[in-house]
Image: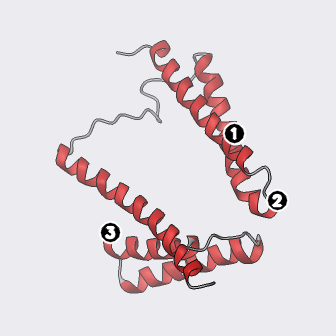
Amino acid sequence: MQTNRDRSVPEAVFAALLLGVGLAAMAQTWSWPIKAALYPRTMAAALVVASAACCGLALLGRGERPGSRVDLEFASDLPPDALRRRTLGACGWIGGFLAAGWLVGLLPAMVLTVLAYLRWVGRESWLFSLVTTAVTWAALEGFMVRLLHLPVPTGVLASWMGR
């Protein structure tokens, strides 16, 4: 059985690592126009505040307690092959999204990923998948492009075609 002290050091180190990631993200957006940097800075600031709080609580010995509602246990009753398949599937979806974002652009990649995931992994009907995808596109386009006027990255295909 691990004591609180045994758990607090790794918890504090991980929180400090996330704190560094948040600070680096904020520093990277420092020279950006405010409209382009608004969302990344907001997310980075939330990460910095939450990570600093977690790090401080862990260092004070008041971090996560064993058996608490948020105690993560990675033990599973699934066979290792099923766990490996699920992990590789999740990594494949993430990698596919990143590749699609690079290839066709961020907004089309998000929309295509929602459609593909709902249809083939979620096994939803075509109607539900298409309606949800349309709502997703409208929300992303309306919020990111029309409302915030964020420069949304286009993919390499668009740049090759001269757009």
Badges 1 and 3: C-beta atoms under 8 Å apart? no
Q: What element carries label 1?
A: helix
Q: Nearer the viewer, residue 26 or 75?
A: 26
Q: Quick check: can you spot residue 114?
A: yes
Image: 14 above or below 62: below
- What's under tag 2, amino acid-wise? Ile
The amino acid type, in three-letter code, at marker 3 is: Val
Disc 3 crowd, CA 10 A, few/some/many (<14, 14-19, 20+): few
Q: How far apart are marks 2 and 1 (CA)?
A: 17 Å
Amino acid under disc 1:
Leu
Q: What element carries label 3?
A: helix
Report how far apart the C-alphas of labels 2 and 3 lie in the structure: 38 Å
- The label shown at residue 34 is 2
Mark 2 or mark 1: name the one nearer the start of the chain: 1
Question: Residue 119: x and y, percent?
Answer: 36, 76
Q: Mark 3 points at which residue?
A: 121
Q: Is mark 2 on a helix, strand or loop?
A: helix
**Mark 1 packing: few (<14 Cα in 10 Å), some, or many (20+)?**
some
Residue receiving disc 1? 23
Mark closer to the chain start, 1 or 3: 1
Left or right: 22 with respect to 7?
Answer: right
Q: Which quarter of the figure has residue 125?
A: bottom left
In front: mark 1 or mark 3?
A: 1
